[in-house]
Amino acid sequence: MTSRGPGKRVRKAPAERRNEIVTTAARVGLTEGLECVTLRRVADELGVQAGLVGHYFPAADKLVAEGFTSATMTELDALLPEADAADPPGTLRSFFGLISSTEFDNVSRLWLNARHLSRYRPVLREHVVEQELLWCRRIERVVAAGVAAGDFRCADPWVAAVRILVAIDGTTAYINTSTDHRAAATGDMVRTFAEAELGLAPGALDASAAG
Amino acid sequence: MTSRGPGKRVRKAPAERRNEIVTTAARVGLTEGLECVTLRRVADELGVQAGLVGHYFPAADKLVAEGFTSATMTELDALLPEADAADPPGTLRSFFGLISSTEFDNVSRLWLNARHLSRYRPVLREHVVEQELLWCRRIERVVAAGVAAGDFRCADPWVAAVRILVAIDGTTAYINTSTDHRAAATGDMVRTFAEAELGLAPGALDASAAG
DNA sequence: GATGCTATTGAGTATGCGACCAATTAAGCA
DNA sequence: TGCTTAATTGGTCGCATACTCAATAGCATC
């Protein structure tokens, strides 16, 4: 839909152009996979020539990596807004509710994608490691706040955050294969695991439960 | 090392040739990644022309899928031999010992690789789903045997097997990225989770412990 | 309105992939 | 021993990628 006639040029400020390139890369990466984030694909999406994208990203790896970071930062802010410090149990209830909906599927695919691709692309790997730490710290902060408020009970918020993320990544690992076969066994696994890890009663973090 | 002079032909029985092609694909896929399993790469490895591999696998997807299956079947037999039905706790102790060694890293990478690649390759996906079920059933059998012998206590061996695998896949998800950052928090997570799931005392499945 | 800077084009190179195929030749069989 | 079959060769083609670069043209400034 972003099509102009051939030859017609739209000249933009470098910062703006670069920004829309990264945003496009993020969208393509999130919906179709990081392998589809190519100079041509992003250029087509924006209705410009591939050479232009190549001008802003002389190494395509960097484009993929920045697209990934852009996508995950946006998603994290939607899942765990940095703003609300009050009511840690409510924050986690909302969080577990969101990640168990099908809208989170593309995010699961993106993480799986990025973690595998990091095997071959060092630039991407650095970004993935940084985002993993960022996500973990964001959860850690909520846990720590809950512990301080007397809502949660756990020895080490960092360890709890790591383990909760491990549980999440374990259940989402099957997003492209046998998700359905396992739904019965893993449906509430992450939430109940988190409740146990935080010294809560079963169901305490259930978003769909009354309360 | 598998180099012959140019033009020299070695004619083999179709079954034998096909078998060594699949075995080579498995090795390349396990050590370098399934993306490296190409007609040319496998042909070079065997010292034959690419056209020959294409003759046995008119669709390259099938080669990748069969290579994956070959690799995972071999690994599963090494981790959980079908033979030993006696001593379920001992079987699991050995299993957890093996998967926490660095020799299991390539297998972790392979699963991560295959689960992502399944997004784009339906033929591979079918094989991955089948292997996931196979691995799960193999664990389920050990759990069921342990329950029957009075060693373990759990409501549903299948559910327990699924959850143990989820824990494993969660911890191995970081194999290409920030494994080290998490080692402290996840080192014994799989084992202790399994012990809880099977109604065992902490450390009961520790291979390195005395006993 | 003219000028200079540079964002942007459009075509180029090189590499790797799967797929295809006629010619060759090794090996089994009559 | 000679014949037949088919495993194997050694190329080809089309397509997609990243990357390079001289030429072009939009925009701000004078």
Image: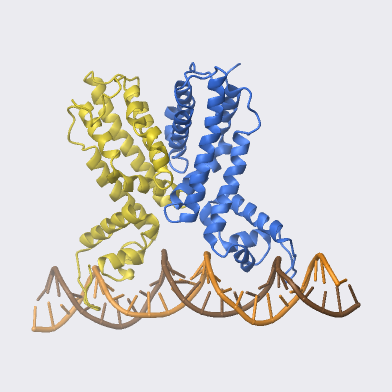
Chain colours: A blue, B yellow, C brown, D orange
The front one of B42 and D15 is B42
Query: Residue A173, how many percent across, how many down?
Result: 44, 40
Q: How many marks?
A: 0
Q: Residue B21 falls in which quadrant of the image?
A: bottom left
The front one of A78 and A180 is A78
- Residue A100 sits above or below residue B127 on the image: above
The front one of A190 and A73 is A73
Left/right of residue A143 with respect to residue B102 in the rendered view = right
Q: Residue at x 40, y 51 (%)?
A: B123
Which quadrant does the N terminus of chain B fall into? Answer: bottom left
- Residue D7 sits above or below residue B165 on the image: below
Say whether residue A100 is visible: no
Query: Residue A54, how many percent across, how many down?
Result: 60, 65
- Residue A127 sits above or below residue A180 on the image: below
Say whether residue A99 is visible: yes
Query: Residue A24, how many percent across, how many down?
Result: 63, 54
Query: Residue B94, how many percent across, how many down?
Result: 22, 34
Which quadrant does the C terminus of chain B fall into? Answer: top left
Q: Residue B192 falls in which quadrant of the image?
A: top left
